[in-house]
Image (cartoon, rainbow, N blue to C red):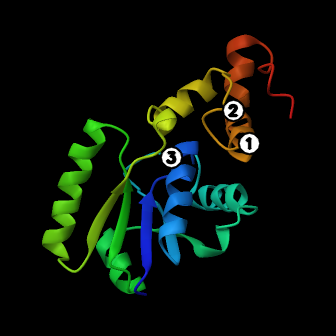
Amino acid sequence: MKNSAIYPGSFDPLTNGHLDILQRAAQMFDKVVVTVAVNNKKTALFTGDERVKLIREAIKDKDWSSRVEIEQFTGLLINFARKQNINVLLRGVRQISDFEYEFRMALTNRRLAPEIDTVFLMPDEQLTFISGSIVREVAAWGGDLTSFVPDNVAVALRHKFKDHHENTFGKPAADDQS
């Protein structure tokens, strides 16, 4: 499809930064395929199916959600893009260290598939510090997640870490009464 893009990532978990980029991408492209990477070499907090479900729930009421598809994939992203007949990859870049990694990946993808371009988008500046690893750390210690992730993701994170909270503190975190 001519005016389509793929937004790949682990989305473990989906953050407000991811949503910001996805919303802007959905306004730029007729179709955005969010690809949830399932990597057997990394241990994910959420399964691929759980991540797909969380993303679907987070965007279901957005006016741009009809332009978004969500799928899982394993393997080379360029092979998935070719199969989908999409030649634009979207990557979020929060800071210089992200850009250095993403730049190398974009050049590698270009070497392997010159017909596929990478477009970099930056999230709103207030969201640039948010990362999946920071969110998981805050969640593990029962911190307030409201400014980091959509509400449905916050609930899922609290459930994932419920045993950790009870074992560490002897009772659930104050915001874990759901």
Labels 1 and 3: the sequence-earlier one:
3
Q: Which type of secondary structure does the marked residue at label 2 adopt?
A: loop
Q: Is residue 45 visible?
A: no
Determine which residue is flagged by label 3.
Answer: 44
Disc 2 to disc 1, C-alpha distance = 7 Å
Labels 3 and 2: the sequence-earlier one:
3
Labels 2 and 1: the sequence-earlier one:
2
- The x and y percentages for residue 158 are 72, 34
Residue type at mark 3?
A: Ala
Front label number (3 vs 2): 2
Q: Is residue 67 above or below residue 167?
A: below
Within 10 Å of disc 1 (Cα), the crowding (few <14, some 14-19, many 20+) is: some
Residue type at mark 2?
A: Thr
Determine which residue is flagged by label 1.
Answer: 151
Q: Name which residue lies at 79% across and 21% down.
A: 172
Within 10 Å of disc 3 (Cα), the crowding (few <14, some 14-19, many 20+) is: some
Q: Do the numbered discs 2 and 1 sit on residues whose CB atoms are within 8 Å?
A: yes
The quadrant in which the N terminus is found is bottom left
Disc 1 to disc 3, C-alpha distance = 20 Å
Q: Is residue 79 above or below residue 17?
A: below
Q: Nearer the viewer, residue 13 or 87?
A: 87
The quadrant in which the C terminus is found is top right
Within 10 Å of disc 2 (Cα), the crowding (few <14, some 14-19, many 20+) is: few
- The x and y percentages for residue 128 are 44, 36
144 sits to left or right of 44: right
- The x and y percentages for residue 98 are 30, 42
Q: Is residue 154 visible?
A: yes
Q: Nearer the viewer, residue 61 or 177?
A: 61
Q: Name which residue lies at 22% across and 61% down.
A: 106
86 sits to left or right of 159: left
